[in-house]
Image (cartoon, grey):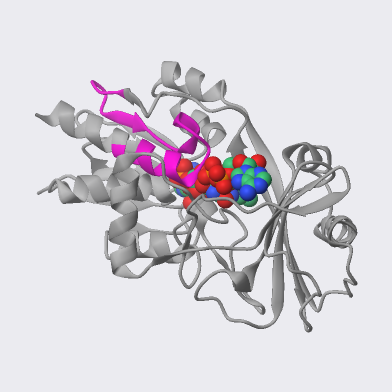
Amino acid sequence: MTVPIAIIGTGIAGLSAAQALHKAGQAVHLFDKSHGCGGRMSSKRSDAGALDLGAQYFTARDRRFVEQIQQWQAKGCIQEWTPQLYNYRAGNLMPSPDEQTRWVGVPCMGAITRAMLGDLPRTFSCRISDVFRGEQHWFLHDIEDCDHGPFSHVIIAVPAPQANALLTTVAPKLANVAAGVKMEPTWAVALAFDTPLDTPVQGCFVQDGPLDWLALNRSKPGRESTPDTWVLHASSSWSKKHIGLAKEQAIEQLHGAFAELLGCVVPAPTFTLAHRWLYARPAVAHEWGALADADLGLYVCGDWCLSGRVEGAWLSGQEAARRLLEHLD
Ligand code: FAD
Ligand code: NAI
């Protein structure tokens, strides 16, 4: 019997590791507490269509990620996004065009991780609470009191605070590293309007005030054109300060900031949605690539091991897989 490798987390880091291992002929089994894959890159189905409430777009600097992007492009699950970009600082809204290539999943961000998952073995709606070793193999325990296993190795591909909780008893040294990583929250809000707003803005970096970013969903390729839906992200500092807000209040306050920023008539939205990302981004970037206790057969990856971006998460998954395969040889 082939004993598979367990991967906890089906965000882009876990799926990147899964793909690299699968390509190398290894059997994997993925677990996620959510009902689907993607994590912070997933899209939320709503009455206003699929909405990207987490990652908005991604850029590529590393050659390996550029090659991956070419493959996704050939598959048709991503396209380039060329919004009318603006910048908002000290009350001034100014066009801010640049030469940066930005990519989005089509028809929604979640299309990328869905394509990566393919038919790899997976168990969803399964929150792992413990990782433990038997005499020869690894086992996972979930919050429903079920055990899963045996597994030859375990890859933990979840945000740092959640990795810390899983590592504490089995690998205290790795747990300490994860415990030292601070991750900051982001409030995300979607607002839909029946009539398009009278503004040329399609994406905007915000330098002060409650907001950090806003984007017009239908300016991205492959999206439904109605209604006019905007995604707003609050800054880390505002999100931290307002972490306990009720969703309705977060919507109201960010709607106010949005109307003030655009400076055009912004009516009451016909649809609203709010999501609080508790572990949205690491406070600082790191250069670990991935963490490992190769003798134990335990590996850790995620955006927080590199840059808190899609590219960083993907590269971290590749690195975890590389180290695991290297140790098999
Ligand atoms: P995640 O996507 O968080 O995946 C971890 C997975 O593990 C999740 O699916 C979770 O459900 C699962 N999990 C956690 N604990 C357990 C457990 N105990 N048991 C089972 N499953 C578990 N990056 C960009 O490059 N461009 C952007 O524009 C951008 N915008 C962003 C905006 C927001 C609001 C947020 C939140 C993030 C943004 N990012 C952006 C960052 C980017 O989304 C992340 O860097 C990347 O998606 C992280 O991937 P990951 O696989 O490391 O983690
Ligand atoms: P990028 O190169 O487009 O942007 C990096 C940063 O450069 C931006 O945050 C912005 O401050 C600045 N910038 C870039 N182009 C600009 C322009 N035309 N005008 C004004 N400022 C500009 O993309 P990269 O490096 O791939 O980063 C991804 C994006 O994801 C960033 O915007 C980052 O803030 C965002 N992000 C958001 C998270 C959240 O929780 N809200 C988490 C992780 C990333």
- Which residue is located at x 85 percent, y 44 percent? 209
Q: Is residue 223 left or right of residue 189?
A: left
**224 horizontally vs 75: left or right:** right
Whether residue 128 appears in this view of the structure is no
Name the foreground residue: 302 vs 214: 214
Counting from the top left corner in percent of width and height, residue 80 is at: 46, 63
Residue 313 sits above or below residue 250 on the image: above
Q: Nearer the viewer, residue 236 or 201?
A: 201
Q: Work out whether 211 lies above or below 294.
A: below
Q: Is residue 315 magenta?
A: yes
- Which residue is rendered at x = 17% and y = 34% of the image? 325
In the image, residue 64 lies at what x, y percent? 29, 42
Q: Residue at x 44, y 27 (%)?
A: 167
Residue 63 forms part of the magenta stretch? no
- Compare residues 207 and 130 and report the one nearer the observer: 207
Looking at the picture, how far across and down is residue 170, in whole percent? 39, 24
Tell me which image quadrant ligand 2 sits in.
top right
Magenta-colored span: 293-318
- Residue at image location 21% in from the left, 37% down from the top: 152
Q: Residue furthest top?
A: 173
Residue 67, can we see it?
yes
Q: In screen coordinates, is 205 left or right of 162?
A: right
User: Whole-percent x and y of residue 16?
Assistant: 33, 47
Quarter of the image where the C terminus is located = top left
